[in-house]
Amino acid sequence: MKQAVSGGSRRNNAVVALILLATMKFSTADEAVVDLDIPAQPLAATLDKLAKISHIKLIYADATVQGLQAGAVKGRLSVQQALKQVLSENGLQFEAVGEGMLAVKTAPKKPAPTSQDNSIFELGVVTVSDQPEFNKKLTSRDIATSVDVMYADKIADQNVLTAYDLFHRMPGVQVTQFGQGITTGKMSFRGFNGEGRVNAVKLLIDGVPSNTNSGDTYFIDSLFPLDIESIEVVRGTNDARYGLHSFAGNISMNTTTGGNYVKGRVGYGSFNTHDIQSGLGYEKDGFSQNYQISYRASDGYRDHADSDKNSFSGKWFYAPSDKYKVGLIARWSEAGAQEPGYMTYQEQLRNQTQSFARNATDGGKRTLGQVSTHLDVNLSPTLFWSSKVYGNLFEDQRYVTYGPDVAQQERNRDEIQYGAMTSLTYHPVVSWLDDFELETGFDFQQQENKYLRYLTDSRVRRSTGLRNDEKWDFLNYGGYIQAVIKPFKWLKLTPGYRADIIDGSFFNYRPGANFGPYPLNDYGTISQPKIGAVITPIEGYSLYGNWGRTFQVGLGQATFIGRNQSNIGPSLNDGWEVGIKLKPVDWVEGRVAYWAQDATNEISRNLASVDSTMIGATKRQGVDVEIKVYPTDKVGVWAAYSLQEAKVSNPPAVVAGTMEYVAGNQVVNTPNYLFSAGIDYQILPQLRSSLWTSGQGDYFVDQANQRSKFGEYAVLNLDLGYQVTKEVEVQFQAKNLTDTRREYVWYDESFGATAQPFFSPGDGIAFYGAVNVRFDY
């Protein structure tokens, strides 16, 4: 290391100076404007000259400036301006490390310029890894459909019971919060039911498929905000990369990989909520290690709502060169919680925080495990191969009482999944095309599933209480081909095709008429053509459109042909979308899209009985509007509004207590609008704020659409962060500032004559504080 000082002396040191305080002020000398006339010369010589002029110390490692040249510095400039000029020319920057002392270091990489011929809408600041670029697979940026991405700076400071709550900021995403112990929530979009009756969203965590057999996204419970690098939502039917569960689109959640850091977060707030999150990253000589350990507990908004959750993950990647990269990811999480239970309409009017004697032993526990291996290989400058092999573990035990005069149920689900994904991406130079990429891939997932359900009294099984004893294997395998063709700079075409096959076996062990094996529905080869296009006639203005097909099959027992039932083919969902993305200037961006989807053979799960009901053909359509305006570095405004409609167009015959849809009825739990909006304001250099809101319209809870509508709400939240030092930030969050009354409401026809709406109130006003610490080394 070298120190350039005012007397011209130099010392070699073995250790690079630690960067301690980013907010230290410069001395008066370096802020003064002086006449400078320094010729072009080696950078070290220019730094020595500036140090003499300003009477400050400049600390840098020999290797940092070795071989670098500084351009001429002429004119009336402050030393600070001169330093920025000569350092930025060489990809360097300086930071204050003490009074009259500056350290020179490598500047962080800037995000690579991205093409404007996409339909991506981003929230937050893009971070760029120093790791070599290996992932040359096609991404959502190559697919002509509506994509939203939220980055870590909008995620890490959030106080959430589960990662589901993070989606309140995401445009067009409906978040259904059950508030029942380990059964905390669901997310959905494009007019699909938010309760899990039709699970239409494929979840990927670090690229690994992470849905349960039923399509539920419970593996999200293993993630804590501090470790999440980004959340990406792909809406529509045009993504050929994924098949099973990607009925309406997919969500990718990516955690931190690479870097040298220690980070932590300690938080406390309303309802005795407390959490500790920690992370460690170490990277050297092509080998990176990332670890995360976190814990969260809360007494809950309602009585009998205690919960706790822990999570551990490790990521190890090795990239000795730019030719290949291998990695291993392991993740484990355990959660336990009490359930306060559902209320009748009259009960929730009297007191929203109460629980009842009937729910005194309700609750559950959940274990989640994931392990995956990763291999990326640059076979040649134009050919890239990527593969993953993974295993998932899901164990869930729940005791639940759905309402008055209803027996408690014990539900046990055990699932083991293992699978693999591989793809080959070809990116040649074609002289008569502006750009061309072709990717083909194959994936499979094998599942081994068990489901037990008993009627119980205070967690004691009744002697005649067995209701379900089922074991089944489920196999899905499929392949795809996706092209990105740019005949001209202003035109991008994205034709694709995917095909999936379903296989499996089922055995019902419950004694009686239903005992024995069930054959698989004949789904055949499920063909899914896709096509999309983006036209960019003027830089900053892109028109895009797409058409595609996705599919759904029966879930659990409904994958197979039950007693006295006939074969049911797959539900095919044909959707199209047209939209425009606008970015007339750097600080204004917007997107508007109209979409429609028509599905056949749609199947719905009954939440209490877990049986399935055929609801027939459906039609969905909507409009999505998104905008963000950031006129200065201090102020930004963002907003999103989705108008949607989901109706049954051709249902089977009405069967009381089972299927009560008629043509034209709205699909239950699908609000007609969703919105989110916020104002971000940098009050002081060290003090940031964000005032934001999210909400939805009301919805029908019964298939006949004869009960009242419920579910409408708008919630206001405030986030504050004060940067005490570069490493330490103190945070405050107020949620539901106006103490808005809201609730999740459900209704199940299978209750017959006693069926009625049941209510689970959402949290009232709440306050949270936290300290975030991060040291980069």
Image (tube, rainbow, N blue to C red):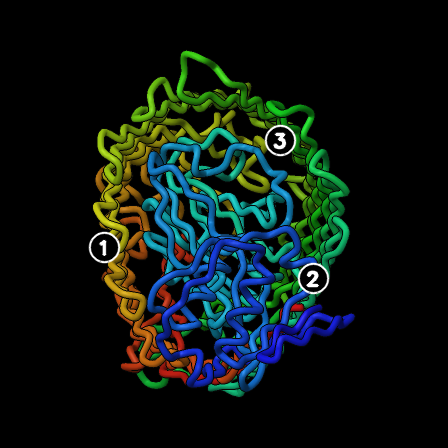
User: Where does label 1 land, which residue?
Assistant: 706
Q: How busy is the neighbourhood of tag 2: few (under 14 within 10 Å), some, or many (20 plus)?
A: some
Is label 2 or label 3 in front? 2
Q: Earlier in the sequence, mark 2 or mark 3?
A: 2
Left or right: where 299 falls relative to 510: left
The tag earlier along the polypeptide, 1 or 2, is 2
Mark identifier at residue 242: none
Relative horizontal placement of residue 376, taking residue 104 as reference (left or right): right
Q: Which mark is residue 476?
A: 3
The part of the image, by quadrant, that contains residue 716 is: bottom left
| In the displayed structure image, the side of residue 13 where residue 536 appears, left or right | left
**Which SS class for mark 1?**
loop
Q: Where does the image place residue 723, in percent across and percent down from the top left?
A: 47, 80
Q: Amino acid at mark 3?
A: Asn
Q: Label 1 is placed on what type of residue? A: Gln
Q: Amino acid at mark 2?
A: Asp
Residue mark closest to the camera, 1 vs 3: 3
